[in-house]
Image: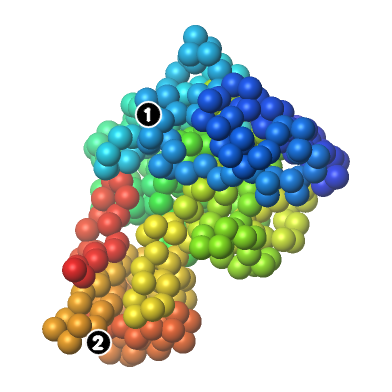
Amino acid sequence: MKNTFMPQFKNLEQLHHHQLEGLKWSVNHVYNGSKFYKTQFDKAGVKPSDIKSLNDISKLAFTTGKDLKEGYPLPLLSVPEKDVVRIHASSGTTGKRKILSYTQKDLDVWFDMFARCYEMAGLTKDDRVQIAVGYGVWTAGMGFQLGCERLGAMAIPVGPGNIDMQCQFLVDLQSTVFCCTASMALLMAEEVNKRGIKDKINLKKIILGSERCSTAMRIKIKELLGLEDMFDITGMTELYGPGTGLDCYKHEGIHYWADKYILEILDPDTLEPVKDGEIGEMVVTTLSKEAAPLIRYRTRDLTRKITKQCSCGSILPMHDKIMGRSDDMIILRGVNIYPGQIDEVLSSIDEVGSEYQLHLERKDDGKDYMTIKSEIKDGFSLNNAQNIINMIKRNVKTKIMVSCDVKICEYGQLPRVAGKSKRIFDNRD
């Protein structure tokens, strides 16, 4: 099948030329269209004419989530309000929400990007896509659905939760693709097996978004459902919504749509580029967004760039899975710990299941302590619990450089949820 939504660059030189033209357009667009950005540029002493190469992006000031909240209700607006055809908002739980506005062109770009994700995952018009993510003012449901319709596949917009309906539609409508969070995928996989309907469904692929999925969880879900493949999709409300990148069938990294935005990986403290392969904060600059463009927006998401080209043959660059957020980073006795590091340690031990919790507390001696509570893998016995505990402790000490306590519990003991699982419980003062 000919790729309809993939960019047709022959080499990286063409891609970089496209990025430079997009960067020049965006800088000029926001300088002339946004009071906020014009003020930012003038403070930094930068004019649109100063952008002559991609390296000149370093001259531009950063934009943050705080800027979006302070600009409520229509922050970063760079077009007349009459040109705005839709708004979406982040799912923030404190203070004013981050509201992003869209022109019709913005929506067209977003849905084309999302259709590209489906295409990279190997979907066709013959697929039936059951969408089990949130609808409403959030970008998730709308993105998954309209991207699916742009591709031409059948959309089944069930929304999150509602396990009975999810199972009924998997059987009755023979859905081939399921879109959800990793926690929802595990819940559904276990439910399908409990209900004995595995042989009655036709599910081939799952596309995961919104939360990190450990290797152990991925393996468990794939085994329980007998899937052909699983994919991680990335995105955020500020950057259109979900659909800004996907790992292909080779699973060597997440291809991001570098023709639509520039990705920098910077040290969150110094805001300087990290060395190749090092973890840093994702900073994004949009190249064609009209209503609410992003100029060096600090996402707070942590990952690393993958410098080698994917063996799938695509020249689109890749980054690693999201390791966590810089503002979710745990500091334990002076050591920075990212949730993704705990995932990796636990996934490396065969006997350990995919579900875990991290409990932090400060004891009477004034010191901080970390306890990892983890399930044993289905089919393994707790008789060997002490050996597993010792293995986890040793691997955490070796790979993350901190000591921890470990508690092992039976498979299925930790809660399953239809949304995002809460894994970190910080009970320190």
Give the image location of residue 357, x and y in percent.
28, 67
Horizontally, residue 332 falls left or right of residue 110, namely: left
Quarter location, residue 413 = bottom left
> Which residue is denoted by mark 2 in the rendering?
383
Quarter location, residue 355 = bottom left
Q: Amino acid at mark 1?
A: Tyr
Horizontally, residue 196 falls left or right of residue 64, namely: left
- Residue 72's disc is 1
**Looking at the image, residue 217 lies above or below residue 316:** below
Q: Amino acid at mark 2?
A: Asn
Callout 2: SS: helix
Q: What residue lies at 43% left-to-right and 42% top-to-bottom?
A: 65
Q: What residue lies at 33% left-to-right and 34% top-to-bottom?
A: 97
Q: Quadrant of the N terminus?
A: top right
Give the image location of residue 329, x and y in percent.
39, 64
Horizontally, residue 194 falls left or right of residue 335, namely: left
**Visible residue check, residue 83:** yes
Residue at far top of view:
82
Q: What residue lies at 74% left-to-right and 61% top-to-bottom?
A: 308
Q: What residue lies at 32% left-to-right and 41% top-to-bottom?
A: 92
* Front residue of this view, candidates 48 and 250: 48
* Front residue of this view, candidates 379 and 282: 282
**Looking at the image, residue 100 lies above or below residue 349:** above
| Mark in front: 2 vs 1 | 1
Circle 1 Cα neighbour tier, 10 Å, few/some/many (<14 / 14–19 / ≥20): some
**Visible residue check, residue 257:** no
Mark found first going from the N terminus, 2 or 1 = 1
**Looking at the image, residue 267 lies above or below residue 389:** above
Quarter location, residue 342 = bottom left
